[in-house]
Amino acid sequence: MIPVSEPFINEADIKAVVTAMRGGWLSGDGPIVEEFEHDFADKVGVQHAIAVSNGSAALDAAFASIDLQPGDEVIMPAFTIISCAQQVVRMGAIPVLIDSNDDDWNMCTERVSDAVTSRTRAVLAVHTYGLAVDMGSLFDAVSGSKIRVIEDAAEAHGLQYRGRPCGSMGDIGTFSFYSNKTMTTGEGGMAVTDSVSLATKLRKLRNLAFQSERRFVHEELGWNLRMSSMQAALGRSQLARLDDLVARKREIGALYRDRLVGIPDVQIAPSVSRGALNSYWIVGLVLGESHPVAEIVRSRLASQGVGSRPFFCPMHLQPVFRKMGLFTEDRHPVSERLWSRGLYLPSGLSITADQIDQVCDSLERVLL
Ligand SMILES: *Cc1c(COP(=O)(O)O)cnc(C)c1O
């Protein structure tokens, strides 16, 4: 079986984790987490980075830090992971969903200005599958307002939009280091910001809202979202070669492109879109009407020994939200099509050129 993603760990990574352990640094306190935050902030070109336990936690903390109130609206893509919407809903705020572009599958930013109301508090841009959201057009839509911009860059490590690192352009940027992301700490995440006050809030929320003056006396509720020193040690080691990891992702993307462009009625992501090069976090494809739906093609691929994953199930189709009475009137035809017709192929950093050929041979066999 060719797995959809395999971790890519080298000796330097292993040594970094062992060194942390031998030094007695295990918990979320101490110099290793601070060094990782410092290095990560440098790499993204921001003032503050706050390491957390995962990418979903980074989003939870980001929405908590801007103090959403019940009834506030947050504009976000329909086509995304539930991590983007869950804390917004838990706070009693309302996700306002926007459909995807046909070509790059990211949120259609031209529609953001029509979605803005007097209740809009934030817009969440999610750089999806390694392609950047059109941030220029998004900022045009909210310019002159107090609307916060949050970027979910969990799928966009090392990606630049018109020379600016993804995650650095909004008020807060969030990252995941889950094991299938371009760089990993196993589980882990990061929130980044240039704002001192947001950084202070995020740090406080991460650590049970402990106060420095009187420990164990709390004025607010937080969470324990701390990242361990062992994870941070792995993160520092991975970050040191992030450029190589992204370059490898692009090689994998190019090898797939060469083969996939020849398959009729299959859409692949563009290699450049809206001022950014594709960083190919994953290699996805959308099957045209002449092919069966993704679920069928995925099971045929599995029977040929090829792993794959479905695309996101859009937020307005999530049973959990429908049961809450949310999104019952929403229709997002592009997101719906991506869900029924999209899948991604094995694109982990360890995949070989031979395996890519095998995957494409299998795909041709099951489609033609
Ligand atoms: C992976 C991912 C997350 C969640 O990160 P976890 O570390 O798995 O919690 C959030 N947003 C996007 C876009 C992701 O791809």
Image: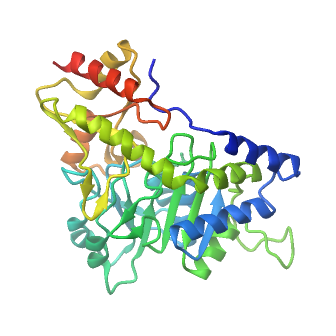
Task: Where is residue 87? Give x, y as percent.
Answer: 51, 57
Tell me the quadrant of the picture where the C terminus can be found: top left
Residue 64 visible in the snapshot: no
Q: Nearer the viewer, residue 77 or 9?
A: 9
Q: Is residue 77 above or below residue 344?
A: below
On the question of residue 150 being in view, the answer is yes
263 to 15, vertically: above or below: above
Left or right of 36? Residue 288 is left
Q: Residue at x 47, y 70 (%)?
A: 168
Q: In which image quadrant can residue 29 be found?
A: bottom right
- Residue at coordinates 31% horizontally, 78% vertically from top-left? 142
Q: Position of residue 111 (x, y in %)?
A: 21, 66
Question: On the image, which quarter does residue 295 sit in?
Answer: top left
Residue displayed at 72% across by 56% down: 224
Where, quadrant-wise, is the N terminus in this rendering? top left
Give me the residue at 22% from left, 21% from top: 364
- Residue 140 in picture, x, y percent from top left: 27, 78
How is the structure coloured here?
rainbow
Q: Of 193 and 92, which appears nearest the observer?
A: 193
Q: Position of residue 67 (x, y in %)?
A: 54, 73
Specify the farthest residue to the top.
Answer: 303
Q: How many marks?
A: 0
In the displayed structure image, the side of residue 48 where residue 317 appears, left or right: left
Quadrant of the image occupied by residue 248: top left
